[in-house]
Image (cartoon, rainbow, N blue to C red):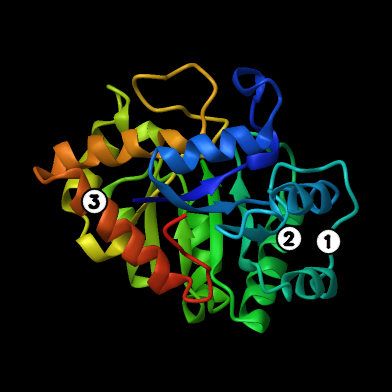
Amino acid sequence: MFIDSHCHLDKLDLTPYAGDFAAMMRNTQRQGVKHILCISIDLAAYPAMRALAEPFPWVSFSLGVHPNVTDQTEPSLDELVRLGEDPRVIAIGETGLDYFHGKGDLDWQRQRFIRHIEAAKILGRPLVIHTRDAGQDALDLLETHGAQAVGGIIHCFTEDWSYAQRAMELNFLISFSGIVTFKNAQIIQEVAKKIPAERFLIETDAPYLAPVPYRGKPNYPAYVKHVAEFIADLRETDVASVARASSENFCRLFPSAAVTAG
C-alpha cells in the first residue's frame, strides 16, 4: 500500500472519469493508495479544495501559500495559524522560495516563507517545502528560524546528496516525485539509492510531473506506485519494501494523520 505525500486533488484532469471525482478516488484506492496529503497552494482556493476531499477520510491537508502565488492578499501569521488548527490539516505549506519564476526583489517571498515557518512552530505542524533555484537560501532560512523543531518534507527533491544530507540534519525528509524516473535525473537517482530507508517519501505532485511511462501526460495519485517501483529498482529491493518504508516514514512524521487501509 502506498502513500502519496504530495498532490493537488483540486487540479486533476477528470476527463478520463467523466468528471467524476469520486470515481477517480475509487480507482486510486484500487491501485493501492491508502492515504493522500492534498497540498494547498493558495488560501483563496483552499475552502473548495477542502470541501472536495472532505468525504474521504484517507485524505489529509496542508495549509499554505506557494511562493509563486502573487495575485492575492498576503497571508498573515494569524490567518495561517487559525486555518491550520483544523485537525485534518497536518502540515504547513506548500511554502519556500522560487527564484526561477520570481522576478525582482524577492524579499516578500522570504518574509512569506518565514511566516509559514513561524505558523508551523506555533501549531506543531511539519512544513512542506518548495524550492527552485533557491535551495541553499531555503535551508538557511529553515535553520535560522528554527524549523528543525517541527521538521517536514523537501518536496519534489531535485538536488544532490550533499543537499540531502544538510536537509536531513535539519530534520527534513526527502520526497521523490516522478522526476526520479526521468532519464536525465541521474543526480536525483543517486540520492534515492543512498538515502537511509527511514528518511524518504514518495509523491506524485499530481497533476504535474507524471512518472515514466506517463511522462508528459496528466498525472494522478494512483501513479505513485510507478515512483515506488523505480526507486525499488534503484535500491535493488522490492516495491513492497519501498512502499512500507515510505509509509512508515510518513506516519512517523504525521502521527495524527488518519492513515488507514483505504
* Residue at which label 2 appears: 112
Residue displayed at 76% across by 43% down? 69
Check the image and report above or below for 211 versus 165.
above
Which secondary structure lies at badge 1?
loop
Q: Nearer the viewer, residue 212 or 165?
A: 212
Identity of the residue drawn at 53% across and 68% down? 258
Q: Secondary structure at mark 2?
A: helix
Q: Secondary structure at mark 3?
A: helix
Q: Residue furthest right?
A: 73
Q: Amino acid at mark 1?
A: Pro
Compared to residue 76, the image places residue 104 above or below, namely: above
Query: Where on the picture, by quarter, is residue 127?
Result: bottom right
For residue 75, the mark is 1
Where does residue 61 sit, x and y in percent of width and height?
64, 59
Between the C-alphas of marks 1 and 3, the distance is: 37 Å
How busy is the neighbourhood of tag 3: few (under 14 within 10 Å), some, or many (20 plus)?
many
Q: Nearer the viewer, mark 1 or mark 3?
A: 3
Q: Earlier in the sequence, mark 2 or mark 3?
A: 2
Mark 2: few/some/many CA within 10 Å (<14, 14-19, 20+): many
How many numbered circles are shown? 3
Q: Verify CB contact (< 8 Å) between mark 1 and mark 3.
A: no
Q: CA distance from mark 2 to mark 1?
A: 8 Å
Q: Which marked residue is nearer to the observer: mark 2 or mark 3?
A: 3
The disc, 2 or 1, on the residue closer to the chain's N-terminal end is 1
Between label 2 and label 1, give the one nearer the viewer: 1
Residue at (34% x, 22% y) in the render: 212
Residue 197 position (above or below residue 240): below
- On the question of residue 141 being in view, the answer is yes
